[in-house]
């Protein structure tokens, strides 16, 4: 239904911050972007949607634990620029008791003193795998991962990175809006 306005009925319009930029004609663009979901993908593809939900929940109950899985979800969402997912995982982690200051430093984890060896290794591997094919998941990098994670955890980390990349691509592509606070 190209050009129809069927999405307005199921998702509210929200405003996302956007850097003031200039378009091709040289006119200043608005500092906010009105965002409305393109279509109700969770309804149209409910079995696939529920499969991703189930995989996400399984990972959080697995050997990595919910907190590390959510930190990986947040970091990959930052890399992919998925505002919806960044907001969701940041909110989850704050409700789980993580210090917002620590979460605000996830993108700068290399310089931040807040993260342990396992978190740093998970962030590094998530960055390498998310950047495929423009990165190198070398034997040297894998050995660094093996130094802090067992095989089951490495396997789960791979699925965590895969599922959040899928969510990011779907949510960004379908313009899933950030829910209103409150």
Image: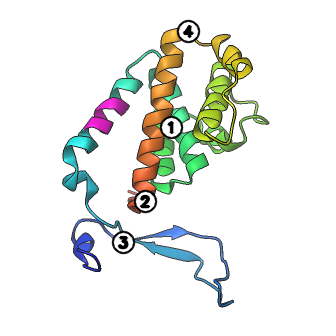
User: Which callout, 3 or 4, points to the residue nearer the camera?
Assistant: 4
Residue 46 in the figure: left or right of residue 60: left
Q: Which residue is mark 2?
A: 173
Segment colored magenta: 51-56
Label 4 vs label 1: CA separation?
20 Å
Quarter of the image that includes the C terminus:
bottom left
Q: What's the magenta bit mostly, secondary-structure-wise?
A: helix
Q: Do the residues bearing badges 2 and 1 touch, measured as CB atoms within 8 Å?
A: no
Label 3 close to label 1 by CB (< 8 Å): no
Q: Earlier in the sequence, mark 3 or mark 2?
A: 3
Q: Mark 1 falls on what kind of element?
A: helix
- Magenta region includes residue 53: yes
**Nearer the viewer's eye, disc 4 or disc 1?**
4
Look at the numbered discs 3 and 4 and tell me whether their residues touch, using CB distance below 8 Å: no
The alpha-carbon separation of the residues under discs 3 and 2 comes to 16 Å
The CA distance from mark 3 to mark 4 is: 44 Å
């Amino acid at each position: 239904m190209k050009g129809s306005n069927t999405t307005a009925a199921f998702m509210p319009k929200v405003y996302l911050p956007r850097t003031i930029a200039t378009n091709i004609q040289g006119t200043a663009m608005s500092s906010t972007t009105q965002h409305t979901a393109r279509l109700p993908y969770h309804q149209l593809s409910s079995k696939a949607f529920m499969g991703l939900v189930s995989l996400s929940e399984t990972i959080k109950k697995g050997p990595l634990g919910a907190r590390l899985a959510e930190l990986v979800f947040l970091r990959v969402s930052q890399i992919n620029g998925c505002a919806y997912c960044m907001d969701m995982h940041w909110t989850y982690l704050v409700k789980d008791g993580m210090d917002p200051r620590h979460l605000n430093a996830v993108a700068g984890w290399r310089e931040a003193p807040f993260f342990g060896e396992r978190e740093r290794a998970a962030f590094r591997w998530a960055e390498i795998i998310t950047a495929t094919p423009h990165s190198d998941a070398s034997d040297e990098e894998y050995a660094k991962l093996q130094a802090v994670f067992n095989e089951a955890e490495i396997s789960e980390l791979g699925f965590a990175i895969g599922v959040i990349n899928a969510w990011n691509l779907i949510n960004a592509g379908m313009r899933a809006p950030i829910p209103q606070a409150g």
